[in-house]
Amino acid sequence: MRSPILTAPVVYRDAHLLVLDKPVGIATTAPDAGPSLFAIARELDPSAPQLHPLSRLDTQVSGLVTFARTAHANQVAIEARKLGTLRRAYLGITARPPAVSSGDWRFAIALDVRDPKHRRALLDDALRSGASAVKDAHTRYLVHALVGPLAALNLWPVTGRTHQLRVHASAAGCPLAGDTAYGGDKRITLANGRILPAGRAMLHCAVFRMPDPDQVDRLIELALSPPADMVALWKAAGGDPAQLALSVADLT
């Protein structure tokens, strides 16, 4: 008998692509063949010639994950990355808004010697000496909305390093709410003394764009609303959930 597994909503499917709404609490892939979004994708799409994730969201992160169903789609995605036409926009929430409302984070990222599952930002070139697995990294950011102590961030990864957005936000002094691995606040205090819990890193892949593998001059563009826990945190601070919505226009 087949063992029951988690599931994930299908956001989009065609001959070449399968896009799922990844829930919090499950990895995109699992090397030990344990529960993962990849296993869910195979259950949902057993006839796919192949399934290759075009991005990997951390276990705590929600949102759009796109799988190439064909070798052609995977090759189109590789070329699109080189040309900058495969793009993603993320929604993040922090309880420590950045001092400057928009800009670029260009901190290189290396393994954290204290825990190889984590990464650390190298805030200057001198720190590269002796660091392991150093990767240049670039994130663009914008403060999208403010309410109480919270800021909603638009985050655009120009590169795609492990934990990049979480590490960059932390290094910039605005760690994501709930991201305790990187200094984020698990409990947020409002001006009236009310305490709001943040049970995981408040990060969501909200928008995805890439060329259509069947017609590369046409773009496939998808947007996904934030999950209930992010909306609840924002509302509890007095915000309007509509402020959290990102669209394909936010990729420009």
Image: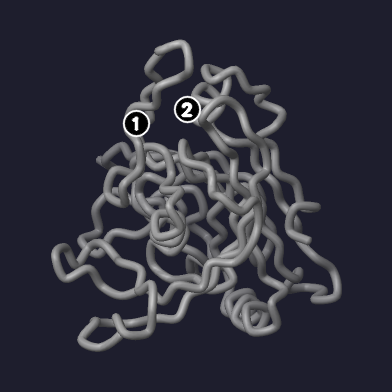
Image coordinates of residue 221 in percent, x first then y, are: 75, 56
Residue 8 appearing in the image = no
Reply above or below: 218 against 251.
below
Q: Residue furthest right?
A: 217
Reply above or below: 233 against 144.
above
- Residue 188: which quarter of the image? top left
Amino acid on which the number 2 mark rests in the picture? Asp
**What residue is disc 1 on?**
199
Image coordinates of residue 212 in percent, x first then y, are: 76, 69
Nearer to us in this view, 172 or 40: 172
- The residue under the point 35% across, 68% down is 121
Reply above or below: 252 against 159.
above
> Are the residues at dot 2 and dot 1 in contact (C-beta closer than 8 Å)?
yes
Image coordinates of residue 145 in percent, x first then y, are: 67, 37
Identify the image quadrant of the N terminus. top left
- The residue under the point 44% across, 61% down is 168
Q: Residues within 10 Å of mark 1 (few under 14, many from 20)?
A: some
Which label belongs to residue 229?
2
